[in-house]
Image (spheres, rainbow, N blue to C red):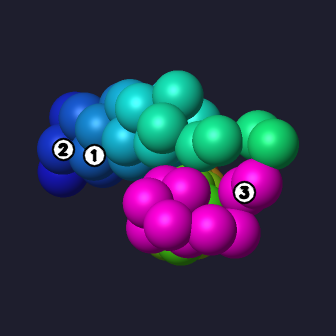
């Protein structure tokens, strides 16, 4: 499970970086840039949720050992 979480975190960072290249920084909320901005926010949320799950699993493992 740990490797799967790390792989998904890498995919979310990749999606975030890809969407950053798609934004027209002169008009970020017009046309296709809107979709890219939404994709950036979605990838960032996914990364944070996966990080939270990763950390909670790590804490649960440590708590179970004691």
Q: Is residue 43 above or below residue 7?
A: below
Marks 2 and 1: which is nearer the front?
1
Image quadrant where one finds the C terminus? bottom right
Q: Identify the magenta region.
A: 27-36
Classify mark 2: helix, strand or loop. helix
Lateral position of residue 31 relative to residue 27, left or right: left
Tell which of 63 and 28 is nearer to you: 28
Read off the residue under disc 3: 28
Q: Residue 35, percent across and down?
A: 45, 67
Q: Secondary structure at mark 1?
A: helix
Residue position for label 1: 8
Side of 54 relative to 55 (left or right): left
Give me the C-alpha separation between circle 3 and circle 1.
27 Å
- Residue designated by label 2: 4
Disc 3, SS:
loop
Instruction: Check whether the beta carbons of the residues at disc 2 and disc 1 lie within 8 A of each other.
Output: yes
**Pointer 3: residues within 10 angstroms few (<14), some, or many (20+)?**
some
Q: Along the polypeptide, which appears first: circle 3 or circle 1?
A: 1
Rendered location of residue 23, percent (x, y): 59, 43
């Amino acid at each position: 499970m740990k490797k799967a979480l790390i792989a998904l975190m890498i995919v979310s960072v990749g999606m975030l970086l890809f969407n950053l290249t798609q934004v027209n920084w002169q008009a970020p909320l017009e046309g296709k840039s809107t979709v890219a901005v939404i994709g950036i926010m979605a990838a960032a949320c996914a990364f944070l949720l996966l990080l939270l799950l990763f950390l909670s699993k790590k804490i649960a493992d440590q708590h179970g050992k004691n």
